[in-house]
Image (cartoon, rainbow, N blue to C red):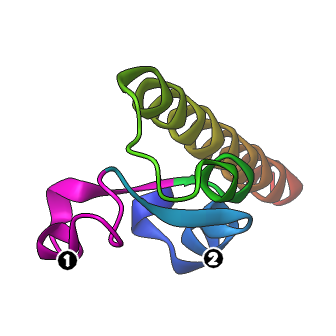
Amino acid sequence: SVSDCCIQSAEFWEGKDISHIYPRSTHPHLANEVTNVMPEDASPNRARGAEIMTDAEIEIAHADNTADANAIDAEFIAQLDDMLFAFI
């Protein structure tokens, strides 16, 4: 899975930012709280600026992260299958 392989992890993070649910500029005391950060595509994160993430934005980011991880995992499994069948 993406969390088990550094190459897959690097692929997952391409184009992503670490988004703060509550912005650092207005909530500095939450800047390093793990519950206040999540991966998000860079474009929506940067467009939002110093606004608090809405529940809808959090859901969209979560769904996008899940889809991206699943796609990377599927590609990796397909590559493994190809390598295994090459030896059969």
Q: Amino acid at mark 2?
A: Ile
Q: Secondary structure at mark 1?
A: loop
Percent across and percent down for residue 81 are: 74, 46
Q: Looking at this view, name the residue that lies furthest to the front.
A: 26
Rendered view: 50 above or below 56:
below
Q: In the drawing, what numbered circle is on residue 32?
A: 1
Q: Amino acid at mark 1?
A: Asn
Q: Secondary structure at mark 2?
A: helix
Kindly identify the residue that appears in the image at 24 percent across and 74 percent down.
31
Magenta-span inclusion, residue 31: yes
Kindly identify the residue that appears in the image at 61 percent across and 32 percent down.
67
Q: Is residue 86 left or right of residue 20?
A: right
Percent across and percent down for residue 43 are: 74, 53
What residue range appears in magenta?
22-39
Residue with the mark numbered 2: 7
Q: Alpha-carbon neighbours of circle 2 within 10 Å: few (<14), some, or many (≥20)?
A: few
**Quick one: 1 or 64, which is closer to the camera?**
64
Percent across and percent down for residue 38 are: 38, 55
Q: Is residue 21 left or right of residue 28?
A: right
Q: How many marks?
A: 2
Q: Earlier in the sequence, mark 1 or mark 2?
A: 2
**Quick one: 60 or 45, which is closer to the camera?**
45
